[in-house]
Amino acid sequence: MNNFSVPLPPPERPTDVRSLRIALPLLTVSWLLLASIIVLAAVRIQRWELAPGEASAVAPLVEFAPVKGGEPVPTRYRAENGINFVTAFGGQLSVLDTLVGWLDPHVVVHTYKEHFGDQTPTDSRRLGFQAMVGAKQIADYVAMKRLGLDVALVEGKILVEELVCDGAPTTQAACTELAIGETIVGFNGVKVETLTELAAQMKGLSAGTRVTLSVLPYESDEDESVEPENRTIQLMKSPDDPNRVIIGFVPSDTRTVRVPFDVQISTAGIGGPSAGLAFTLSLLDELTPGNLMGRGRVVATGTINEDGSVGAIGALEQKAVAVKDAGGTLFLVPAGQSPSEMKAARAAAGSSVTIVQVGTVEEALVQLAQNGGEGLLVPTK
């Protein structure tokens, strides 16, 4: 009988106790670090960003529609290479976002006071949306007037957008008696519906005079059941012009435009007036034949006034970054931006973006022609 030897399984290796002693703490630290990052990303704090936003085409947001008693909607010349408007972001930050923002040279981290000033977040959003509505209205007016269409501006309600506290009286000042978002409907017992009517009532009054304003609280001006509140206000000298007497508030631009046909520009969720120039140029482009923009991707920023002048805007550096990221090649910006703002914007945009300052719509059209545009080819009636 043959004897066979059966090999035994190899002995188990003893546990490396020293390796476990190293691995377990490292694993624990990793989990704690991950949990900390999740918490830091979730917890919102009293910090807000001013950061690069997006550059978006205006034309896809535009629609024309007839109005009752108006003219037929004109031919629309849809632009293949239309103008773009640009935004900056300004949302509330988490702890992690704040740390990242501090490290990003193109992001500004604001405190509550720096971001909102004397306004509340609700006031800021509402007035931002009101400013966007105003920008659309003025853009309609400027573009249609430039094309010779029947258009007119109509004054709106007297809405308090900002309070003037510099140099305000110590008692019964508008700075303390009025609130942002309220609507003034009366002056010393006389009904006033527009700024022109209010100015007429103030004519000849001097600083220190006490007047009675009839005021509707925020969001109640459309409710006929709400009675106006009377506030006694002491008039003051304007901090910008001591020869001018003011109540002590800055009104919101609530003007509307009477147009031969309706123009709708969909900008849900976007506030502020800085897209006015871009809206104006887009309407001119859509209502006239030919390539108005010329070569590359053209972006514009700037407020628009009824005389066609272009006003300065904020966050220029952040918007320049957004233009660069979107592949913009020509960036039209207001002539009123300071040298330091222009230097920062050009550094942020780099050599791929040409930044040109313009003071009026006409100057913008000249720059577009130099960019290869065909000019404003107004169709014959």
Image: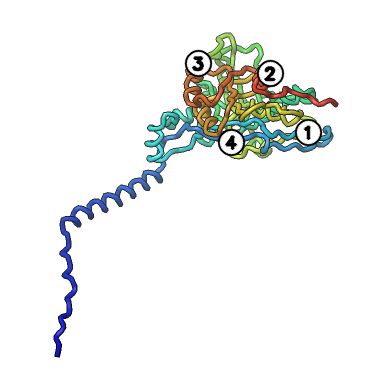
Q: Position of residue 197 (x, y in %)?
A: 70, 21
The quadrant where residue 10 appears = bottom left
The amino acid marked with disc number 4 is Ile
Of the image marks 2 and 3, the number of the one nearer the N terminus: 3
The amino acid marked with disc number 3 is Pro
Residue at figure coordinates x 47%, y 17% from the top left:
340
- Which residue is most to the front? 2
Between label 2 and label 4, give the one nearer the viewer.
2
Left or right of residue 329: residue 376: right
Q: Position of residue 173 (x, y in %)?
A: 52, 21
**Cα separation between marks 1 and 3:** 41 Å
Q: Which residue is mark 3?
A: 339
**Cα separation between marks 1 and 2:** 24 Å
The amino acid marked with disc number 2 is Glu
Q: Which residue is mark 1?
A: 261
Of the image marks 4 and 3, the number of the one nearer the N terminus: 4
Of the image marks 1 and 3, the number of the one nearer the N terminus: 1
- Which residue is most to the right? 381
Picture disc at residue 270: 4
For the residues labelled 2 and 4, say whether their Cβ atoms are less than 8 Å apart: no
Between label 1 and label 3, give the one nearer the viewer.
3
Q: Which residue is mark 2?
A: 362
